[in-house]
Image: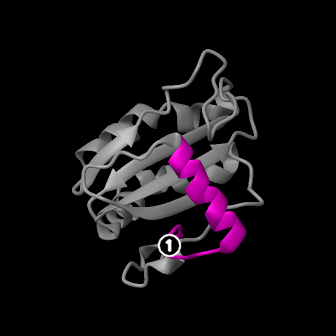
Amino acid sequence: MHLAELNISFWKIDPGSDAARGFVDHVTRINGLAERASGFVWRLLDEQRDADGKNAVCEGADTIMTLSVWESPADLEQFVWKTAHKGIYNGKHQWFSAMKSHNLVMWWVDEGHQPSIEEAKQRLDHLDAKGDSDHAFGWTHLPHVKLWQQQECG
């Protein structure tokens, strides 16, 4: 089995503003870093939206998302917390609104499966409604990965 993850964020500032450059200017580099990371399998390009900037998870240009698959939780954990991604994550409070619901959901997929946006949205809704389970979960459901516990949210 592989690990799928969906991460969504809602801009609190104009993504075209100078204030957003600390994030926007690094998207291509961080995505490339992910794609070269150990254990990376696949990601859906956030750029693949309809003409109105919408998809099933991100309902407009004020949202961004990452939908990806990794060989293991340890591989995802290493990328998130032990690469340049961590610096961008630590600055998220400057660019993105705090969410009342979960912004991250993970679940197990068969090797070779590329989850759809609709599947990811269903998993996120399940996590919001029922909490961590084998069907949809966050970092706390993975006791063998610990780096997330050492992080402080901005």
Quadrant assignment, res 32:
top left
Q: Position of residue 134 (x, y in %)?
A: 48, 75
Bin the neighbour count of mark 1 within 10 Å (Cα to Cα): few under 14, some 14-19, many 20 and up: some
The quadrant of the picture occupied by the N terminus is: bottom left
Q: What residue does disc 1 label?
A: 139
Quadrant assignment, res 154:
bottom right
Q: Position of residue 58 (x, y in %)?
A: 64, 37
In the image, residue 119 above or below residue 105: above
Compared across the picture, whether 5 is left or right of 37 comes to right
Farthest-out residue, bottom:
143
What number of labels is visible?
Answer: 1
Q: Residue at x 58, y 31 (%)?
A: 21
- Segment colored magenta: 118-138
Q: Secondary structure at mark 1?
A: helix
Q: Nearer the viewer, residue 122 or 80?
A: 122
Color scheme of the displayed model: one colour
Compared across the picture, whether 83 is left or right of 21 comes to left
Q: Main secondary structure of the magenta part?
A: helix
Does the segment drawn in magenta span residue 115?
A: no
Q: Nearer the viewer, residue 99 or 83?
A: 99
Q: Residue at x 73, y 60 (%)?
A: 101
Does the segment drawn in magenta span residue 123?
A: yes
Residue 20 visible? The answer is: yes
Q: Residue at x 66, y 23 (%)?
A: 16
Identity of the amino acid at label 1? Trp
In the image, residue 1 above or below residue 85: below
Q: Position of residue 146 (x, y in %)?
A: 42, 80
Q: Position of residue 121 (x, y in %)?
A: 59, 49
Q: Residue at x 69, y 65 (%)?
A: 128
Residue 103 visible? The answer is: no
